[in-house]
Image: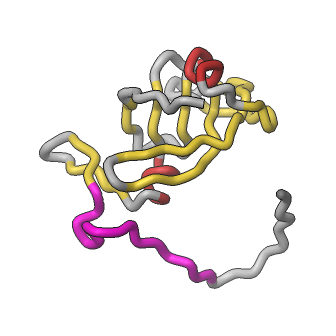
Amino acid sequence: MQPIEVEALVDTGALHLGVPEHVAIQLELTELEKREVTVADGSKKLCSYVGPVKIQFGDRSCFTGALVLGDTVLLGAIPMEDMDLVVHPTLRKVISNPASPNIPSSSAKANHQHIVHLFQ
């Protein structure tokens, strides 16, 4: 599978990566499940959740799932956090976190314990 380069709308109010159906088809992404999604106008839609998707932004990357919706690629908060990217409001650009310019930084600590099930 060849990677594709796309322009993405950055939305800090969105959680996930959103991809149009034609992008999901090009990348041959497999539907993992359906998810109910609240969109900008407040309405709810049932969307395919597909993956995995590798996202690359400059020298940073992450693996994530994607919601199939809309007609443009939408980069939400979860992949941005995973790649340690921030929005520079004055420049209206996404940039690597200035606090960790050379390598993505993350937090791996928890204050609460929950049971989760992991699958391969």
When asked about the image quadrant of residue 92, the answer is: top left
Which of 71/90 is in front? 71
Residue 46, compared with residue 11, is above or below; it is: above
Name the residue at 82% across, 67% down: 116
Specify whether 115 is left or right of 49.
Answer: right
Residue 70, compared with residue 98, is above or below; it is: above
State which quarter of the image contains the N terminus: top right
When asked about the image quadrant of residue 24, the answer is: top right
Q: What is the chief secondary structure element of the magenta stretch? A: loop
State which quarter of the image contains the C terminus: bottom right
Residue 35: % across, % down:
75, 35
Specify whether 13 is left or right of 102.
Answer: right
- Outermost residue toward the front? 1
Specify whether 61 is left or right of 48.
Answer: left
101 falls in the magenta region? yes
- The magenta span reads 96-110
Residue 63, compared with residue 38, is above or below; it is: below
